[in-house]
Image (tube, rainbow, N blue to C red):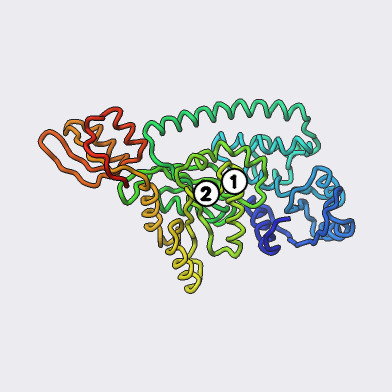
Amino acid sequence: MRARDDERGLQEAEALVRAIDLDLVGSEILPVRAARPGSFFGSGQIASLKGWLEEHEVELVFVDTTLSPVQQRNLETGFGTKVIDRTGLILDIFGERAATREGVLQVEMAALSYQRSRLVRSWTHLERQRGGFGFIGGPGESQLEMDRRLIDERLVKIRKELADVVKMREQHRGARRKVPYPIVALVGYTNAGKSTLFNRLTGADVYADDKVFATLDPTMRGIDLPSGRRIILSDTVGFISELPTTLVAAFRATLEEVIEADIIVHVRDMSDPDVEQQGRDVLAVLNELGIGAERQQEHMIEALNKIDRLDEEERERTVSSAARRDDAVAISAVTGRGVDNLLEMLDARLRTGRRIVTLDIPVTDGRTLSYLYSHGEVLERTDGEESVRLKVSLDAADLSRFEKQHGGAVQDTSETG
């Protein structure tokens, strides 16, 4: 079981159930000293729960842990109901929320890989409450078992389709490299306020709600920092404790924007009593993606969000603590407090290691002038009759690219930003 407070774990489990619009009849914390290999719970617990389930006419039991295929089948027999574990429910939530073709394919691949090991029937208990997607069958399929061969054939087809999608994504990424804007990726525990912050910073209208996994597919927008420097901001799926490994693997392509990001903004819900454990869960997932502790330390900023929900004393303590750090800022994505400080911190972080150069550009060369304004920070400008002299702060890569094309225009490269 998870290393977090039992009550907080129960609240998160209830939030997962509500996220897919199921009717929550009841919830309970059951002590398990040692999980039974065949049924997870002891026979006495199963018998006691069976009577309660029959009395309340419960059709589905959600067990907030990972069950083996044998445990799931035996619990279904013992309870006389459908049983779903944490992995299965999260997969189904993702299946409902996926909007892009890539997202749908990734969820389906993860779900089929999960089903392949147990050959469970389609989740028709959910079909009665909402529309399914893709692989989730209709009510008439409740007596059918997926054949392992059919699953394998479908997985082969999905992998081919995903390969085409990933190839197209790489082409788009390659196009962005030709006009390279720094990428800033928002990550955080689900419901930490990433999409609300994304909307605040970009003026976009990305769906944001007070529930887990409100958004799934990544969204990217260009924004200008206080210096005028343009960046690409990426909003990603929220992380959660015990995120199924099949989903981490399947969504690796979607999360490549995080892997390649110049800066990662870790959005944290400071109003949640479980914020410290949530932070560790996020860092664990990043580590699974190949973003280790060293890179986390060098490229991450913490946005201590939802300070508007704290009492005055706690809010001031959080603000003061963040002010003493160079990698954290206290904010409220809802009210906007501290957001300007976050933008300034991003600006400062991106300026580190930049070169300051003086350039003479012909007044007729509008394309080069536009490039310098969009890729660098113009510190000084002197207009002459035939040329414009600019003092510009540029990244090493941008300066190298510029020198290859306009080497003669560089007058001074002695300063560093």
Residue 169, above or below 81: above
Q: For mark 2, give the secondary structure.
A: helix
Q: Residue at x 67, y 40 (%)?
A: 246
Amino acid tagged 1? Asn
Q: Quadrant of residue 345?
A: bottom left
- Residue sitting at 43 percent across and 64 percent down? 324
- Residue 407: percent from the left, percent from the top? 26, 30
In the rendered structure, the answer to whether residue 40 lies left or right of residue 166 reads: right
Q: Considering depth in this image, is 359 or 375 the residue closer to the camera?
A: 359
Q: Horizontal and vertical percent for residue 5?
A: 68, 63
Marker disc for residue 287: 1
Residue 92 against residue 269 in the figure, above or below: above
User: Which residue is denoted by mark 2 in the rendering?
Assistant: 296
Q: Is residue 383 above or below residue 158?
A: below
**Outermost residue toward the left in this view:** 385
Q: In front: 343, or 336?
A: 343
Q: Are marks 1 and 2 in contact (CB under 8 Å)?
A: yes
Q: Is residue 65 left or right of residue 211?
A: right
In the picture, measured across the screen, residue 343 lies left or right of residue 282, that is left
Residue 336 placed where, x, y %? 40, 60
Residue 109: percent from the left, percent from the top? Answer: 66, 34
| Label 1 Cα neighbours within 10 Å, binned few <14 / some 14-19 / many ≥20 | some
Rendered residue at 54%/29% (across/down): 165
